[in-house]
Amino acid sequence: VNITTRTDRNVTIVALAGNLDSNTSPQAQLALDAMLAGGVTRVAIDFTALDYISSAGLRVLLGTAKKLSAKGGALHVFGLNETVREVFDISGFSTILAVFRTEAEAVKGF
Amino acid sequence: VQHGPFLGKDTMPPAFRITIGADLGDVARVGAEFAGFAEANGVPEKVRRGMAVALDELVTNTITYGFGKRGTRERGTGEVTVEAELREGQLSVTLTDDGSAFDPWGHTTPDTTGSLDMRRIGGLGIHLVKQMMDEVGYRRAADRNIVTLTKRIEDES
């Protein structure tokens, strides 16, 4: 997975390219943990270039959302393809994470 | 009977096979090989992605529960074989391993309705696979676990 980060207003936008599975999720976990340690509270993850996500990736998202929530922040996600959306719907993540269509909506949603 | 664009009645169906050690570090090789097979044979993206999720869940599950501390065999001493075949408008995958007897489907469905604070991940991977595949199966034969997955390929035209 390729991870690129930028800031839009007070929101840290994390773009993930590739896939988030058992092999790549530890790398994403490290990157997100480092951002949280750096004090960010508003994170929007860009899934536009993410091919698929498995439960290992969901685990990373859940942990990150919980940590952000505990700090008074939040995790937003946007740009889900059909398969990622299906995984979110089946797992119930569509109801526990704030899912947006576009980056503009995800940023505005904080 | 609906035929996919890649099917010829008189030719061998496209197929591939990979065997890895029962080692979590080898799981990525299965994903890479499968992606290459799917691309070379025109498997639709939705089917490829769904099966990629299933393979990640099941191969990691098998290695975690069938080998090492939780299983009867040492990690790294066993083998996991993944075979895929395109036939009759469907993608079929068979996973065979020589770890402890383990039926991945014989477990309860996890809670997928709790709040953020209450949510756990355990069991979610297998639940995903059950929902995303059209058919799943399990049998134990010759001291091996044999797990089967089928995903239908809809005509895109």
Image (cartoon, grey):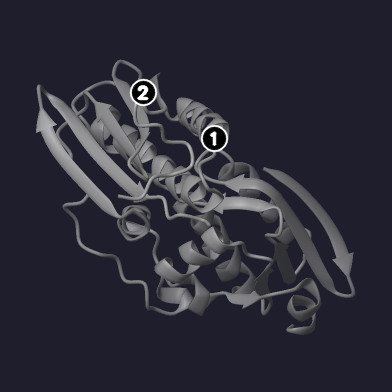
Task: Tell me: B99 left or right of B127.
Answer: left
Q: Chain of mark 1?
A: B
Q: Is residue A105 above or below residue B82?
A: below
Q: Look at discs 1 and 2 and give the one toward the viewer.
A: 2
Task: Tell me: B75 left or right of B142.
Answer: right
Q: Nearer the viewer, residue B126 or B9?
A: B9
Q: Nearer the viewer, residue B103 or B11?
A: B11
Distance of mark 1 from mark 2, alpha carbons? 20 Å
In the orientation shown, which residue stands out farthest toward the bottom?
A109
| Dot 2 crowding, Cα within 10 Å, few <14, some 14–19, many 20+ | few
Task: Tell me: A90 left or right of A101.
Answer: left
In the orientation shown, which residue stands out farthest toward the right?
A9
Q: Residue at x 40, y 60 (%)?
A: B121
The amino acid pointed to by label 1 is: Ala
Q: Chain of mark 2?
A: B
Q: Nearer the viewer, residue B70 or B16?
A: B16
Q: Which mark is residue B12?
A: 2
Q: Is residue B145 above or below residue A100?
A: above
Q: Position of residue B58 (x, y in %)?
A: 34, 41
The verdict on a common chain for dots 1 and 2 is yes
To which residue does mark 1 refer?
Answer: B35
Quarter of the image for residue A2 reads: top right
Q: Is residue B98 above or below residue A76?
A: above
> Looking at the image, can residue A34 be seen?
no
Secondary structure state at the residue bearing disc 1: helix
Q: Nearer the viewer, residue B96 or A82?
A: A82
Q: Which mark is residue B51?
A: none
Q: Residue at x 46, y 71 (%)?
A: A89
Secondary structure state at the residue bearing disc 2: loop
The amino acid pointed to by label 2 is: Met
